[in-house]
Amino acid sequence: MGNKHKEKQHYVPKFLLKNFSQNGKTIIALDRVSNSIIYRSVDSICAENDLYEEKWENANPQLGKYVLDNKIENSFVNNEGKMSTLTKQIENDIMTGKGNVLLSTDERETLFDFVTYLYLRNPAKMKEIISDYDSTDKAPEVKKMRDNTDYIFNQWGWGSSKSLFDHSKKFMIFSSELEGSPYNVERARLSKMRYVFWHSTEEEFVLSSFPLQFVIDDNEMVHRILLPISSRIAIVFFNQLLYGMDEGSVMAPYIKDIRANMKMNLRILRKDVARFFIAKNEDTLKRLMR
């Protein structure tokens, strides 16, 4: 018997959401569409049904209901498991007083894989990339490939191959095997960055449904990325470390700087990209709304 289809698919991993929950089950969030504070389960927020899936249309039922059922979803599982373990280790090291947390080569690989996946998994970002792929569908070489695939499907009595091509666009986004895939392009860009840690003892970090906060200049060069991994700890990536910083340093940011960063994120991110802002306590979100 095959694995059961997983319909509810998260674009912010559940382990990360749980780090911003008081009980591991319920999330407090600012819903920017209704402009209200809501309570949702970890299972239901930052998730969509069949986000990474494509149903077979007008195809032989023997092919099943979905194209490569849960293939993309399952490809995230290994990295999420490693990153969950790594965040716990980082938090433990920092909370026990370490002033510098250097990651091993394997841990660094896990971290940058995770950041790349987070960037690409957002539904709005996926739609933008798929739209770019759609613009190439009329190219002669693509049309020829589609015609040949349609011919093979008809020969085997499988019906339409449209769903296969639609799913392939999603699959290519996260493929590490395809040179020039969005994953490989973004992974190469992000992995050049250096990291430090922010440990806040007085002010909470806020997670959003697009967890990464980018600081980009007019030339579209990324200078900094902030990733909260718990309500008190964030990983901060710099294109170039500022004077006096060492990679892996644990730093204590000012309350005003944290609040300014969270408000900036709220102001910059579109609602379709980051509908929800999530905090461990309701008071943090109320301050964010002021």
Image (cartoon, rainbow, N blue to C red):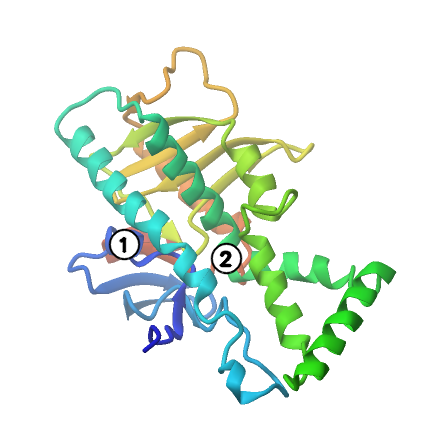
The residue depicted at 52 percent of the width and 27 percent of the height is 192
**Residue 115 position in % (x across, y down):** 44, 42
Q: Is residue 8 above or below residue 99?
A: below
Find disc 1 in the rendering and name its residue. 15
The residue depicted at 32 percent of the width and 22 percent of the height is 248
Quadrant for residue 232, please give it. Answer: top left
Q: Residues within 10 Å of mark 2 (few under 14, many from 20)?
A: many
Q: Is residue 229 above or below residue 247?
A: below
Q: Is residue 288 above or below residue 31?
A: above
Q: Is residue 177 above or below residue 57?
A: above
Question: Residue type at mark 2?
Answer: Asn
Q: Verify CB contact (< 8 Å) between mark 1 and mark 2.
A: no
Q: Secondary structure at mark 2?
A: loop
The residue depicted at 45 percent of the width and 49 percent of the height is 118
Q: Is residue 129 left or right of residue 51?
A: right
**Residue 237 position in % (x across, y down):** 44, 30
Marks counted in the figure total: 2
One can see residue 1 in this view: yes
Residue 66 or 250: which is nearer the viewer?
66
Quadrant for residue 22, please give it. Answer: bottom left
Q: Residues within 10 Å of mark 1 (few under 14, many from 20)?
A: some
* Mark 1 vs 2, N-terminal side: 1
Residue 48: which disc? none
Q: Secondary structure at mark 1?
A: helix
Q: Residue furthest right?
A: 140
Find disc 2 in the rendering and name its residue. 122
Question: Residue type at mark 1?
Answer: Phe
